[in-house]
Image: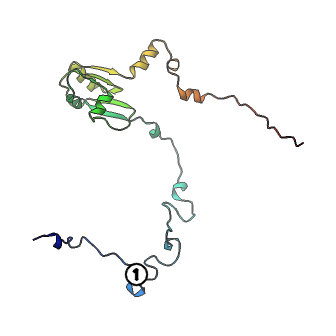
Amino acid sequence: MLRLHNLRPRRGSRHRVKRLGCGESSGHGKTSGKGSKGQKARSGGSIRLGFEGGQMPLIRRLPKRGFNNAAFHKRYAVVNVSDLNSFEAGTVVNEELLRNANLVRGQFAGLKILGDGELKHDLTVQVDKISTAAREKIEKAGGTVTLREARRIAKTEAGVAPAEAEPDAAVAAAKPRANKKTKSRKKKSE
């Protein structure tokens, strides 16, 4: 019968620690398995990943060509139509509501609805993007879809240029500044 005083670990689950530097006859004596001298034999001595002893490393030898758009890629939070069935009829579904319901988590550029599943009742959906199938299913159930990007489109159609409507900080920063040359003033020794 198992009691606290006779508990033992399973056989083979625990191994004895390799004891180093216990004399040359122990098998792990003298250099303790580190070979003789050199940087790796020293305590605290380690070589960083990719270091090739001063030789030009592989990562710097290979040519780097082309352009990658991955840095400018926008990630959208994706929600399917079937996920919207958890809300009651007539509810206004927006990003805040979806975050409270834990259907959307993390940082995203916007919200997109995809058309997987069926919608059982009418909802008002406010999103950044929506697939054609999802729009059809929501409107078929009696709901409405409004896009958050529609504000910008409406301003451009009304004749107001987007730059006038919303001044962009990046555009202002890109304008060249006038170079002002400052004269160096030397102190006259009196």
Q: In the image, is residue 174 above or below residue 7?
A: above
**172 horizontally vs 92: left or right:** right
Quadrant the N terminus occupies: bottom left
**176 horizontally vs 6: left or right:** right
Q: Position of residue 152 (x, y in %)?
A: 43, 20
Q: Nearer the viewer, residue 57 or 164?
A: 164
- State the residue at coordinates (56%, 27%): 171
Q: In the image, is residue 61 above or below residue 18?
A: above
Determine the image quadrant of residue 130.
Answer: top left
Q: Which residue is mark 1?
A: 28
Q: Position of residue 11 (x, y in %)?
A: 20, 73
- State the residue at coordinates (46%, 36%): 72
Q: Position of residue 108 (x, y in %)?
A: 38, 35
- The residue sitting at the right extreme is 190
Using a 10 Å C-alpha cutoff, classify the residue at mark 1 as few (fewer than 14 neighbours), some (14 to 19) or many (20 or more). Answer: some
Determine the image quadrant of residue 106.
Answer: top left
- State the residue at coordinates (48%, 41%): 68
**75 horizontally vs 117: left or right:** right
Disc 1 marks which amino acid?
His
Q: In the image, is residue 96 above or below residue 160?
A: below
